[in-house]
Each structure stands twice: as structure tokens, then as C-alpha cells.
Amino acid sequence: MRNWPLYDLSVRTSRIELRHPTAEDLDRLADLAADGVHAPGFMPFFSQWTDGDRETVTHRVLQRHWRAMAEWTPQDWTLYLVVVHEGEVVGSQSIGAVDFGTTREVLLTSWLGLRHQGSGLGGHARAASLELAFTGLGAEHALSVVRQGNDASQAVCRKFGFVHDGVQTNAVRGERALSDRYRLGRERWAEHRRIDAEVRGLDRARHLFDATAQDTAATAAAAPRSTPALASALSGIRYAPESDQAAA
């Protein structure tokens, strides 16, 4: 699609590809979600979007992606990418930001289909998303929010060098649920970077991310840094009710 350059965007590692979903990809992703994302007894998502019958779940997946595209602005965006392994859609990875040109920070969310968890694909998807954030867009910080008790996703955050950045409370299935916020800075990301990833097709879409002020990773690395204000640190939380972190 010539007028939506995000369709050219992809990030590849040795095992997976992140890409903007086609209509066929979205159908496959919706079916994957309806097949199961987590054990029934534990809800990792604040919005409980996986509760309901098959048609309800598939429609939620499609509508979430369509809504993000329809409401996109350079100052307020959420990029949903599908995770593809050996030609099969196995999950979803998102990057979101508000006023990215100023804050230079993003919120990451992800989930894999239940049958693909525990295979290491979640780590590759996380590495690819961090490559896009830091090398591609010139981010200074990446955030993640993980419910306590979601041990697999907690482990992924620690593996990639995220540090604890506070606790938040949400109502999940009518009960009080605690989640940990994690933050990863550029320098710490570089220290923990173990999986190579390549970003492709970003240049034509860069203006959509309000990322044109720092066009290269080198420029971003040389830019003055300051401690983010509290409002900036919490900016990504607005995305959490829509798509938070599930097991990797």
C-alpha cells in the first residue's frame, strides 16, 4: 500500500520477523488468539481481551489493529506488528509512544500463541522490537508492564536488562492485580544485547513516529540526556489496558 509506508517496515532476527500485518496476517493472528494465549486460571491482560467466545476474541484482535491505524498521529501512536516464524504467524508485538519526539521513550507489549511459548521466540521478538526502538527510532528508554505472577514475561524483562520502575494496581476479573513496571535505557540495552536484528523499510515511514529530529542511532546516542519527568515515565501506561505483556 503506497500511502501507508508502514507496510514496508520489518525487523528480522535469525529466527523471527516482525512486520506490519497484512489482512491475511491479521486473520491468522485473530485465530491464533482464539486458540489460546494463556492458561484459563490466570489473566495477564488488564483489559481481559481474551475472555469470551471465539468470535468475540477474534473481533477484538482485528478491531484493536484497525483502531490503532485509524487513530495514528505522529504524536500519539501504537505500532502493532505480527511475529512470524518459518512463515507462520505466532504472536504479536507492539511499540507505542506519546510525544515521542520529546520523551524519546516507548512502551513495549507482546504475546505469543500458547502453543508457541517456551520456544525462545518471545526473546527474539523482544530483541527485534528493542532494535527498532533504539537503533531504528532513536529511543532513549523502553518501558514494559508485567503482571506479578507472570513469571515468563518477568524473566524476559530481566534477561534483556530492564530494571524495576515501580508498581501499579489494576482491577482484573473483579480482583486487585499488581503489575511491575520496567524501564530499559539505551546504554543498558547495548550491554545486554545478545540477539542480532536488522530493521528494514523504516526510512519512508520515519516521519509517522515523530522521530525525524534524530535520524540515526549515533545522533540519538550523542544527544543530551536527562532524567525523564514523572509524567513522561507514566505516559506509556495509557496503553496497558489495551495490550499488556503476556507470556513469552
Image (cartoon, grey):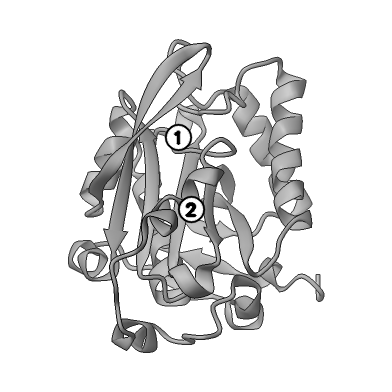
Q: Residue at x 18, y 67 (%)?
A: 191
Specify the label residue 235 is tagged with: 2
Q: Residue at x 37, y 36 (%)?
A: 146
Q: Confirm whether residue 80 shows in the render.
A: yes
Q: What residue would you read off at disc 1?
A: 116
Q: Quadrant of residue 81?
A: bottom right
**Extreme front residue here?**
230
Residue type, label 1 = His
Rendered location of residue 196, percent (x, y): 33, 68
Mark 2 or 1, nearer chain start: 1
Rendered location of residue 98, percent (x, y): 55, 60
Q: Confirm whether residue 84 shows in the render.
A: no
Where 200 falls versus 55 (above or below)? below
Rendered location of residue 45, percent (x, y): 50, 28
Near-viewer residue (60 or 214)? 214
> What kind of element bears circle 2?
helix
Q: Residue at x 38, y 89 (%)?
A: 219
Question: Counting other residues with Cα less than 10 Å from the Cα at mark 2, is it few (<14), some (14-19), or many (20 or more)?
Answer: some
**Quick one: quadrant of the N terminus?**
bottom right
> What kind of element bears circle 1?
helix
Left or right: 179 as drawn, with respect to 190: right
Near-viewer residue (152 or 185)? 185
Rendered location of residue 61, percent (x, y): 69, 36
